[in-house]
Amino acid sequence: MEAKMIKKDIYDVDGLIDERFGKEGTPERAEAEERAYAFYSGAVIEEARKKAKISKAELARRMGVDRAYITRIESGQIEPKVSTFYRIAAALGCSVGLTFTM
C-alpha cells in the first residue's frame, strides 16, 4: 500500500489511511484509533520513565505491580486507566495535567 500521488510530491495520505484502517466512522477505524491511543500512551510513559532514569522493574516495584504489567503498558498492549496514569506519574516523580476544552 502506498499513498496515491496527486501531483508531484503531493500524496493522498487520507486515502492511504482509509485503505489501511477503514474509513472514518467505521468499526475498523475506531478499533485502529483505540490501538493508536494505547500505543501513544505507552510511548509517553516509556519516555517519561527513561527521562527519570528508572528501570521497568523499579517502576513496577514503586507501583506494587509486576514488571510484565509495565511492559504491556509501554508496548501498547493495554491502555492504562486514568487512575493508573496518575499512579505511574507519582512513581516517576511527575505530574499529569488534564485540560478539557470545548
Image (cartoon, grey):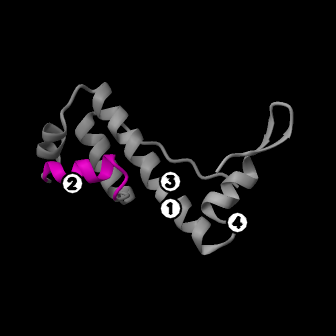
Q: Is residue 43 left or right of residue 89?
A: right
Q: Nearer the viewer, mark 2 or mark 3?
A: 3
For residue 58, which quarter of the picture? top left
Mark 3 to mark 1: distance in Å? 5 Å
Percent position (x, y) of residue 84? 31, 55
Percent position (x, y) of residue 101? 66, 51
Residue type at tag 2: Tyr
Residue type at tag 4: Lys
Q: Nearer the viewer, mark 4 or mark 2?
A: 4
Residue stretch in magenta: 66-77
Query: Is label 4 in contact with label 2 (beta carbons under 8 Å)?
Result: no
Chief secondary structure of the magenta portion: helix
Mark 3 to mark 4: distance in Å? 15 Å
Q: Which mark is residue 34?
A: 1
Q: Which mark is residue 23?
A: 4
**Which is more N-terminal, label 3 or label 2?**
3
Q: Which residue is mark 3?
A: 36
The single residue placed furthest to the right in the displayed view is 7
Q: Which residue is mark 2?
A: 69
Q: Is residue 79 left or right of residue 87?
A: right
Classify 83 as above or below 44: below
Q: Element at badge 2?
A: helix
Bin the neighbour count of mark 1 within 10 Å (Cα to Cα): few under 14, some 14-19, many 20 and up.
some
Bin the neighbour count of mark 4 within 10 Å (Cα to Cα): few under 14, some 14-19, many 20 and up.
some
Classify 53 as above or below 64: above
